[in-house]
Amino acid sequence: MAKLSLEKKTELVAHCMGTTDGYIKTARVFGVSKCGVKMLVAKYKTNGVEGLSHKKGAYSGEFKEFPW
């Protein structure tokens, strides 16, 4: 999937959920894959707008120091 700004992701999700266009038509309009649209809509439904922002998979220093 092409890199999209948070604004574009929000626009994409609003378009998909607010119109009768399905995943495929929304994907064509925004130039992304159908799977990318499904993923963004699912993230939005689960976590709202926060779910659309990119988060790196970094662990906190506290977690790294935990003695296993």
Image (cartoon, grey):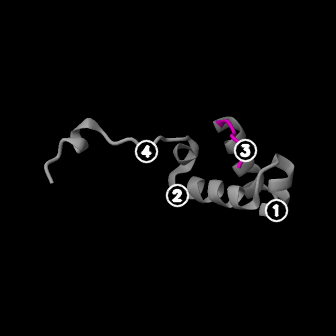
Q: Is residue 20 visible?
A: no
Say which residue appears at 22% left-offset and 39% top-offset.
62
Circle 3 — which element? Answer: loop
State whether residue 59 is above or below residue 19. Answer: above
54 to the left or right of 62:
right
Q: Which residues are magenta?
A: 1-5
Proximity of marks 2 and 4: CB atoms separated by less than 8 Å: no
Q: Position of residue 29 (x, y in %)?
A: 86, 50
Q: Quadrant of the C terminus?
A: bottom left
State whether residue 17 is above or below residue 5. Answer: below
Q: CA distance from mark 2 to mark 4?
A: 18 Å
State whether residue 43 is above or below residue 55. Answer: below
Specify the farthest residue to the front.
68
Say which residue appears at 85% left-offset and 59% top-offset.
25
From the image, state whether disc 2 or disc 3 is nearer to you: 3
Mark earlier in primary sequence (3, 4) = 3
Identify residue for label 4: 57
Say which residue appears at 70% left-offset and 61% top-offset.
35
| Amino acid carrying mark 1 in the image | Ile
Q: Is residue 48 visible?
A: yes
- Residue 68 magenta-highlighted: no
Checking the image for residue 2, the label placed there is 3
| Amino acid carrying mark 2 in the image | Thr
Proximity of marks 1 and 2: CB atoms separated by less than 8 Å: no
Q: Position of residue 64 (x, y in %)?
A: 24, 42
| Amino acid carrying mark 3 in the image | Ala
| Amino acid carrying mark 4 in the image | Gly
Mark earlier in primary sequence (4, 1) = 1
Circle 2 — which element? Answer: helix
Circle 4 — which element? Answer: loop
From the image, state whether disc 1 or disc 3 is nearer to you: 3
